[in-house]
Image (cartoon, rainbow, N blue to C red):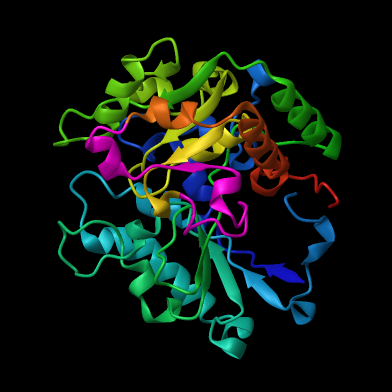
Amino acid sequence: MIYVYDLPAMFNTDLQHKCNDLDPWASKCKANLNSGFGPPAKELAGIVPENIFTGVPESATAFYIPFYVGLAVGNYLWGNHTAKERDWHCEMMLKWVQNQKWWKRSNGADHMLMLGRLTWDFRRLTDADDDWGTKFLQMPAMKNVIRLCVERSTWDPLEVAVPYPTIFHPRTKSDIREWQTFVRRRRRTSLFAFVGGRREKIKNDFRGVLQDQCTAAPDACRHVDCARKSCLDGTTAIMESFLDSDFCLQPRGDGFTRRSVFDCMMAGSIPVFFWRRTAYLQYEWFVPAEPGRYSVFIHRDDVRNGTSIREVLEGYGREEVAMMREKVVEYIPKFVYAAPSEGLGT
């Protein structure tokens, strides 16, 4: 049984209500609707059983800390903020939780929380104001706490990588089955898709290499050129490109991982990876153990040296593609997040 702490509002809901201040470029209010699941996806019109949680801490074997640390830190990552400002919420939360009876029982070893951002945003090594992120995970009180995050450090045994949320949040088991049937039967007209854009400020940007290969094969590749605004929230154009393609190219994002991986797989498209840490060394609980059964790996150096992605993917026969897609579709229930208040029962 898991007990969820009733944290002071300053550590969660107050942060969520300041949604206009969470990103210097765009409001996050829409993304924070429906308990953080975002607005209804009109165009495409409890992840665990409810009884796993308890309101009685005496009967709990684990304790969840509902600290919205990604929001707390994200507000101070850009702009003229000090290291002390970026650490303040984290220090105050740890001060609060260390005074709780159940923390003292185990020194936090049976506690867990969700980071909500890449692990690297919480691993600042110095107190210099120009050093990135917060030192939350370097704070002594965090040494025993299990943390869930969308990208983990492969050297940290206490971190578990969990999937990025997609735009599909099923309400019932039948929602899942209907979606699986839909993507399984979808007629796909393109060999592969690439959702992303060239980053001119980055020397030898790999996304630019992929874009060049995609645009050079318009009869085989479907491209969505990501201006920042158009790709933030899983637009219809993105989903259509994945739904219409057998394969989808998945370079690394700001870290090694990328939300697009799960949008792609949710659409029944087979991911093509160029870094092993993008999925294989991250999401062991949520993807098949044998990478070749659901994905394609092409080393990025081979692509830079002239390997044709189109030729590699054309080398897969129709039956092989169908088997790989079936494995992707089979795993959809493992990585989508159910509608907030409704456990799916299995």
Q: Which corner quadrant of the image does residue 61 belong to?
A: bottom right
Q: Name the residue rendered at 62%, 85% in the picture.
A: 101
Locate the N terminus by quadrant. bottom right
Q: Name the residue rendered at 53%, 45% in the picture.
A: 164
242 part of magenta stretch: no
Q: Is residue 122 visible?
A: yes
Depicted 76 relative to depicted 120: above or below: above
Q: Is residue 111 left or right of residue 300?
A: right
Determine the main secondary structure of the stretch shown in magenta.
Answer: loop
Image coordinates for residue 228, horizontal then vertical, percent: 34, 25
Q: State the extent of the magenta-drawn residues as a range.
A: 279-307
Q: Name the residue rendered at 61%, 89% in the picture.
A: 105
Image coordinates for residue 163, horizontal then vertical, percent: 56, 49
Depicted 24 relative to depicted 246: above or below: below
Image coordinates for residue 344, horizontal then vertical, percent: 82, 46
Q: Residue furthest top?
A: 219
Q: Is residue 27 visible?
A: no
Q: Nearer the viewer, residue 6 or 226?
A: 226
Q: Which corner quadrant of the image does residue 108 belong to?
A: bottom right
Depicted 74 relative to depicted 271: above or below: below
Depicted 39 relative to depicted 163: above or below: above
Q: Residue furthest bottom?
A: 105
How many marks on residues? Answer: 0
Q: Name the residue rendered at 51%, 49% in the picture.
A: 14
Q: Is residue 129 left or right of residue 221?
A: left
294 part of magenta stretch: yes
Q: Is residue 96 left or right of residue 252?
A: right
